[in-house]
Structure formats: structure tokens, C-alpha cells
């Protein structure tokens, strides 16, 4: 900028003013930039803190959801396990009870069979006894005289095991000796070969047949004695209920 000597002070003042204004403008610009930088920095920090808080909140919420779901699944699994255990326990108890009932039932049936076998052996032996058969036939003759009409024929068959020659001879000898007794008229004795010992009474006129054999006596005595036998077993073993 050129000035005449006359106007030199004024020019200098103008230049000085321009320089001052320029310096002020530069300082203002630097200050504004600094403020802008500070603002950006503060806003960035605030935004980052806000984002971090949001992420932390979401993470906590997700963690809480996972924990709640895990607790629910765990509770359900525990309940299912408890129900399974209860079901298996009940099934096991029922199986044990059924096995116990079956065992006791088999025991009762075994006892009945054993009792029948013992009784059959006893009756077989007793009905082969000549003295017993003699007394039995005499008793039958006396009963027939009192209870059977005189015009009805009474036939008494004395059994022996077929093929047993000793038993056959014994029965024939017994009949011979019994024929010496005074039986009622119309009463006859004769031997009969069969599979078991005993006596059969036929009342011809009434078409009536009475069997006193191993089978019939075993059935009769089993019916009368077995309940008492079972009662004795129950008194010594309360679990025996058959």
C-alpha cells in the first residue's frame, strides 16, 4: 500500500489496524477450531459412553434371560427325573408285590400238592390193611341192614390193584372169612381189580353207587383237613395266605 508523505500517519494506522484485525481473526479462528475439537471430543465420549451403557444393558438382559431359561430347563429336567424315578419306583414295588404273591401262591399250591401226596400214601396203605377192610365191610353190612330196603340187593366190591397177585389173594381170603359173618339177605361180596384200593357199594334196586376209594377219601379228607393245615402254616408264617 503506497501513501504520500502527507498521509503517512494515516496509512500506517490503516496498516496497523489491518494487521490487528488479521491477528484477531486468526486468534478467533484458532479458538473456534479448538472449541469445535473439544465439542467433538466431548460428544464422541458421551456417544461412546451411551453406546457402552446400551451394550452393557443388553448384555445384562441377555444374561438374565439365559439364566432364567437355564433355571426353567433345570427345574423341568428335575421334575421329569423325579416323575421317572417315581414311576420306576412304583413299577418296581408292584413287580415285587406281584412276585411275592406268585411265590406265595406257588408255595400254597406246592403245600397242597405235597399234602395230597402224603394223604394219598397214607390212605393207600390203610385201605390195603386187611383188618381195616374187614371192619369197614362189617360196618357197611350193619348200615345196610338199617337203611336199605330188604328187597334191594346190596353188592360190595373189594378193590385190589390189577396185576398184584398178592393183593388179589388177600382180598379173596378176606371175602371168604367175611362170608362167615351174618350179613343181611341180599348182600354179596366180590373182588374187583382196579387201579386203587377201596370198597364200592352198589345198591341195585335204587341204582345207587357209593365209592370208598383212595380218590374219594383223599378228596374228602383234603377238603376237611387242608384248611386246618393251612391255618397252622399261617400261625407260624403270617406271609402264608394261600
Image (cartoon, rainbow, N blue to C red):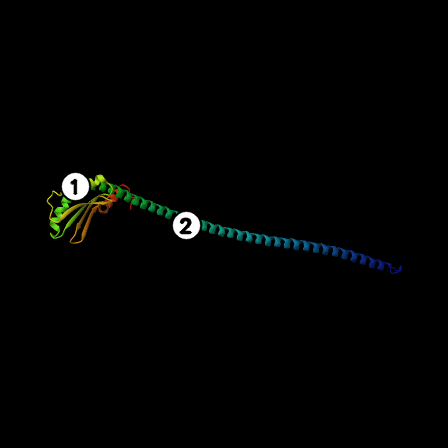
Residue 130, image x, y percentages: 18, 40
Residue 162 marker: none
Residue 30, image x, y percentages: 74, 55
> At 16% across and 41% down in the image, what residue appears?
174
- Does 16 sit above or below residue 174? below
Number of other residues with Cα within 10 Å of mark 2, as a class: few under 14, some 14 to 19, many 20 or more:
few
Q: Nearer the viewer, mark 1 or mark 2?
A: 1
- Residue 132 visible from this viewpoint: no
- Does 205 sit above or below residue 214? below
Q: Secondary structure at mark 2?
A: helix
Of 150 and 127, which appears nearest the observer?
A: 150
> At 35% across and 47% down in the image, what residue appears?
98
Residue 87 marker: 2
Of 161 and 47, which appears nearest the observer?
A: 161
- Looking at the image, residue 207 sits to the left or right of residue 5; the answer is left
Q: Residue furthest right?
A: 5
- Residue 176 visible from this viewpoint: yes
Of 28 and 154, which appears nearest the observer?
A: 154
Residue 174 marker: 1
Number of other residues with Cα within 10 Å of mark 1, as a class: few under 14, some 14 to 19, many 20 or more:
some
Q: Secondary structure at mark 1?
A: helix
- Looking at the image, residue 99 sits to the left or right of residue 201; the answer is right
Of 144 and 95, which appears nearest the observer?
A: 144
- Looking at the image, residue 137 sits to the left or right of residue 196; the answer is left
Amino acid at each position: 500500500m503506497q501513501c504520500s508523505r502527507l498521509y503517512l500517519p494515516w496509512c500506517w494506522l490503516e496498516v496497523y489496524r489491518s494487521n490487528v484485525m488479521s491477528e484477531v481473526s486468526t486468534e478467533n479462528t484458532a479458538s473456534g477450531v479448538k472449541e469445535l475439537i473439544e465439542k467433538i471430543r466431548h460428544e464422541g465420549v458421551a456417544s461412546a459412553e451411551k453406546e457402552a451403557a446400551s451394550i452393557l444393558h443388553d448384555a445384562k438382559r441377555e444374561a438374565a434371560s439365559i439364566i432364567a431359561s437355564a433355571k426353567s430347563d433345570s427345574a423341568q429336567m428335575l421334575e421329569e427325573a423325579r416323575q421317572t424315578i417315581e414311576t420306576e419306583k412304583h413299577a418296581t414295588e408292584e413287580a415285587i408285590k406281584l412276585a411275592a404273591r406268585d411265590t406265595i401262591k406257588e408255595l400254597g399250591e406246592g403245600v397242597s400238592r405235597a399234602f395230597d401226596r402224603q394223604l394219598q400214601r397214607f390212605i393207600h396203605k390203610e385201605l390195603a390193611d386187611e383188618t381195616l377192610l374187614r371192619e369197614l365191610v362189617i360196618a357197611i353190612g350193619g348200615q345196610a341192614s338199617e337203611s336199605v330196603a330188604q328187597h334191594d340187593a346190596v353188592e360190595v366190591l373189594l378193590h385190589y390193584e390189577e396185576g398184584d397177585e398178592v393183593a388179589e389173594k388177600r382180598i379173596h381170603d378176606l371175602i371168604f372169612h367175611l362170608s362167615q359173618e351174618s350179613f343181611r339177605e341180599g348182600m354179596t361180596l366180590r373182588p374187583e381189580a382196579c387201579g386203587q384200593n377201596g370198597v364200592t357199594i352198589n345198591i341195585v334196586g335204587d341204582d345207587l353207587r357209593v365209592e370208598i376209594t383212595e380218590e374219594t377219601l383223599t378228596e374228602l379228607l383234603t377238603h376237611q383237613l387242608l384248611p386246618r393245615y393251612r391255618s397252622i402254616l399261617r400261625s407260624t408264617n403270617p406271609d402264608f395266605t394261600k
